Amino acid sequence: MQVVELNTANIVVLNTAQIQALTTVQIPALKTSQVVAIEAGDIGVLTTTQIQALTTSQIPVLTTSQIVALTTVQVPSLTTTQVAALETPQINAMETADFAALTTTQVAAFAPAQFGSLGTAVISGLTIAQIPGLTTAQVAALNTDNIVVLNTRKFRH
């Protein structure tokens, strides 16, 4: 299948089997408009290898619905470069279980500016295992409300 030739209307109608058949050569070749056109439900069927094939140009265009569709199996497969490419609205859209599935290395990959603009719901989703991996710059970027939430999380267990 020549995916780069498909228009967004063609991408939308791809079925699950066709999405799962996309290769790690085809996925990075997708234009950002094609990535946005992938239905949210189809994002959840991508393999971890397919997820890792997404480029840092494609990651920021994922819709919040597509981010929500990521599974707790897919999220830990994101590379640190991909995690760093996530935009704040995307991170804030992550479900609590997905955010908790991030490794300490992935959490440390968030830029301080990204981390500082996260909502309290996301910060409260940090696991006890993730907290020690936070960088000094990430903690310094947190607002007062998030510091309170972080302290509550840290000492609750």
Image: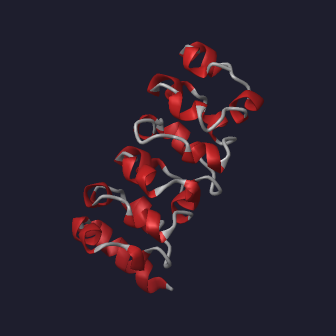
**x, y (%) of residue 58?**
45, 36
**x, y (%) of residue 142?**
26, 66
Rendering quarter of residue 95: bottom right
Q: Is residue 16 left or right of residue 100?
A: right
Q: How is the image coloured?
A: secondary structure
Q: Please give the name of the residue rendered at 51% of the width and 86% of the height, measured from the top-left corner.
A: 157
User: What number of labels is visible?
Assistant: 0
**x, y (%) of residue 111?**
30, 58
Query: Viewer-proximal residue, 130 or 151?
Result: 130
Instruction: In the rendered view, tell whether residue 19 sits above or below residue 76.
Output: above
Rendering quarter of residue 76: bottom right
**x, y (%) of residue 24?**
61, 38
Rendering quarter of residue 123: bottom left
Q: Please give the name of the residue rendered at 47% of the width and 36% of the height, measured from the top-left corner.
A: 62
Q: Quadrant of the N terminus?
A: top right
Query: Viewer-proximal residue, 153 or 18?
Result: 18
Instruction: In the rendered view, tell whether residue 132 sits above or below residue 100.
Output: below
Q: Please give the name of the residue rendered at 57% of the width and 14% of the height, measured from the top-left corner.
A: 5
Q: Please give the name of the residue rendered at 47% of the width and 35% of the height, measured from the top-left corner.
A: 63
Instruction: In the rendered view, tell whether residue 29 sits above or below residue 11.
Output: below
Q: Residue furthest front?
A: 25
Q: Is residue 48 left or right of residue 116?
A: right
